[in-house]
Image (cartoon, rainbow, N blue to C red):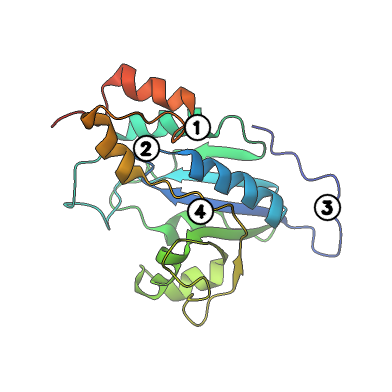
Amino acid sequence: MSTDSWPYRGGVDKRRRVGVFGGTFDPPHVAHVVLVASAVHQLRLDELIVTVAGVPWQKVGTRSISSADDRLHMCELAFAPVDHVTVSDMELRRDGNSYTVDTLEALQDDQTELFLLLGADTASGLDTWHEPERLAELASIAVFPRRGYANDSVPNGFDSTLLELPGLEVSSSDIRRRVPAGRPIDGLVPPTVVTYIAENGLFGPE
């Protein structure tokens, strides 16, 4: 979608404001779409980059994961209607585990201000991530609320902003359970993604 700068961008700091929202996206759902649209607006982002994890090291061995191509295509379908959003395969093209710090390193330059979008549950554990000190140097953390988690629990040393979002409780894991049980997922994922899942037989009995 369009990545033209916001027409009212002003002030001394002329750096591009770029958000990064990474995940497994297995599958992407409507709460993801609402999140990126809200983040673009609230953070006044010139671009929001959705990065699809190649080898999500924190989930390896915990469950089967859909192919990288399927997850990338579902994201392209899900986020296509949202202005200023780009779906990137940069982590899929990288060998080895997907570390957020490597993605931020690849995107950072003197003309760019980076914002990393994380749920409150994930943000609270940032100090356990790969190279957390460097993460704190590279990006500000934009925290979106998650039920049952404190929204101000970002570890010390990280600059953070709390996003305001409607209370949508949708999860990819619930969608993966619904499909093989024959339960509807309409309204939980974008219609184009519903069609893609059905046509490609994703999340069926293993």
For mark 3, what is the residue? 9
- Please name the residue shown 46% across and 79% down the image: 155
Q: Is residue 66 visible?
A: no
Residue type for callout 3: Arg
To which residue does mark 4 refer? 106
Task: Determine whether label 2 and label 1 are within 8 Å by CB.
Answer: yes
- Badge 3 or badge 2: first in the primary sequence: 3
Q: What whole-number distance in Å separates the C-alpha atoms at marks 1 and 4?
A: 25 Å
Alpha carbons under labels 2 and 4: distance apart: 25 Å
Which residue is under mark 1?
Answer: 78
**Residue sitting at x 27%, y 30%:** 179
**Residue 88 location in percent, x, y?**
49, 39
Mark 3 crowd level (few <14, some 14–19, many ≥20, 10 Å Cα): some
Amino acid type, residue under disc 4 in the picture: Ala
Q: Residue furthest bottom?
A: 156
Residue 87 seen in the figure: yes
Q: Name the N-terminal-most of marks 4 and 3.
A: 3
> What residue would you read off at disc 2?
27
